[in-house]
Image: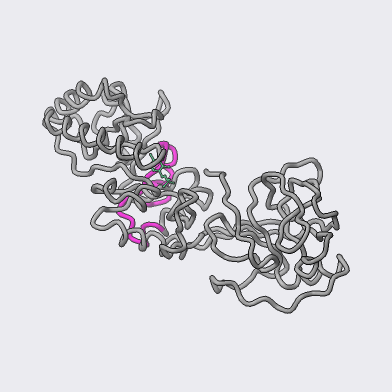
């Protein structure tokens, strides 16, 4: 009834484009959370084919999964449970993001990236502990216990001023690491949003997650203008069609049948790809309204704009007693429309809903 379609060539092309954009900085492709739902191994291979220099995941289990799949590219893992097995990571050649003195002591034999907390307050070594941490790291490096390959941090993406504040703290941290005798080969700070919008944060490496899947890291980042395209499309068969009075509120993502647009009643359809905030049937023109509760009590999550293929639009229109409109021009991406299904794009799509013409897919806040 529903499926996620993954376009690996989109991941490949997106990585290649981002790489050109941020050069000479290198690209670490973030494939945590099952490759943001695209499949860990598939996303990793596509990113490497696109020219990613390195992979990154949150936890060691994912890093080991990449190794088990035969992927031998450099992998950094950065979010560790207190009992995380660093020995297994070292054996598998996984680089370890170190966020505390305690982790530093356990990283025997490892290649590490020391993380400073510059203000996100998720993890990272607190600034108050930084000098002691880099001094200890330098000592461990001198005695051959570990190697410090990177110094890094993660931005809060809380506006340009906060980014600049964090960037300066990061610079101070790098300077302190050097003063302690470390010589980190890679400094990295930016994830997708800053890598695109704040060139000063690119340093030697950028960690690209959401953008490589073709989705915007923030509402105001136009990834389509950068030539990036969504790698995932959700498709589902139409589950229900209803006529509702204009103005009726609902929690179902749907779209009026094209030829019912200019009526005061909206003809709506629903797919099991999801719903989000309540929306209201519009009185005239445009799109999107709903009157259909989700079936069987199950919540449909995460939908943006939805549209039907020509076949379904005709079927829906005839159910609603409306005359089908003539065929719409092909979608801008040139991808063939899936047969017998309604699809919705993921949130970066700049495509126009064929049923609504003007309705763009809505931002979807869900992130892996
Ligand atoms: C998830 C993550 C990223 C990628 O972030 P995007 O905004 O998806 O590009 C980068 N760095 C760290 C530490 C992360 O956890």
Q: Above or below — where is 295 with respect to 341?
A: above
The image quadrant of residue 320 is bottom right
The percent position of residue 131, horizontal first and vertical second, equals: 20, 23
Residue stretch in magenta: 47-71
The residue sitting at 39% across, 52% down in the picture is: 70
The residue at 77%/46% (across/down) is 250
The image shows residue 235, relative to residue 93, as above or below, that is below
Query: Is residue 327 a member of the stretch shown in magenta?
Result: no
Q: In this view, does 368 lie above or below 353?
A: above
* Foreground of the two, 170 or 161: 161
359 vs 169, left or right, is right
Question: Which residue is pictured at 65% across the width and 57% down the height?
Answer: 305
- 272 and 306: which is toward the camera: 306
Q: In which quarter of the image is the N terminus?
A: bottom right
Q: Which quadrant does ligand 1 occupy?
A: top left
Is residue 284 shown left or right of residue 150? right
- Identified at 28% across, 22% down, the residue is 101
Is 188 rendered above or below residue 269?
A: above
Residue 300, given in percent of the width and then of the height, sits at 70, 46
């Amino acid at each position: 009834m529903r499926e996620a379609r993954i376009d690996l060539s989109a991941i490949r092309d997106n990585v290649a484009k981002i790489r050109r954009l941020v050069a000479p900085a290198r690209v670490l492709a973030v494939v945590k959370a099952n490759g943001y739902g695209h499949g860990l191994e598939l996303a990793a291979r596509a990113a490497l084919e696109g020219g990613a220099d390195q992979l990154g995941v949150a936890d060691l289990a994912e890093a080991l999964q990449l190794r088990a799949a035969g992927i031998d590219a450099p992998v950094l893992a950065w979010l560790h449970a207190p009992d995380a097995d660093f020995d297994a990571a070292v054996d598998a050649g996984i680089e370890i993001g170190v966020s505390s003195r305690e982790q530093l002591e356990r990283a025997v034999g490892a290649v590490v990236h020391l993380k400073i907390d510059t203000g996100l307050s998720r993890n990272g070594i607190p600034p108050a502990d930084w000098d002691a941490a880099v001094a200890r790291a330098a000592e461990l490096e001198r005695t051959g216990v570990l190697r410090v390959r990177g110094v890094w941090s993660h931005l809060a993406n809380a506006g340009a001023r906060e980014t600049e504040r964090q960037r300066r703290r990061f610079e101070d941290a790098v300077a302190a690491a050097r003063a302690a005798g470390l010589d980190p080969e890679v400094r990295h700070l930016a994830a997708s949003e800053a890598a695109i919008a704040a060139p000063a944060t690119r340093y030697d490496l950028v960690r690209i997650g959401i953008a490589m899947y073709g989705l915007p890291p923030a509402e105001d980042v136009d990834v389509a203008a950068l030539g990036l395209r969504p790698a995932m499309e959700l498709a589902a068969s139409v589950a229900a069609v209803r006529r509702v009075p204009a103005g009726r509120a609902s929690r179902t993502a749907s779209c009026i049948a094209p030829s019912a647009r200019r009526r005061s009643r909206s003809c709506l359809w629903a797919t099991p790809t999801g719903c989000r905030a309540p929306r209201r049937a519009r009185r005239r023109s445009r799109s999107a309204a709903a009157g259909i509760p989700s079936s069987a009590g199950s919540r449909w999550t995460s939908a943006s704009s939805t549209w039907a293929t020509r076949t379904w639009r005709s079927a829906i229109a005839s159910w609603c007693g409306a005359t089908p409109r003539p065929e719409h021009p092909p979608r801008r991406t040139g991808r063939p429309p899936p047969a017998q299904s309604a699809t919705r794009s993921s949130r970066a799509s700049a495509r126009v809903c064929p049923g609504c013409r003007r309705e763009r897919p809505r931002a979807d806040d869900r992130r892996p």
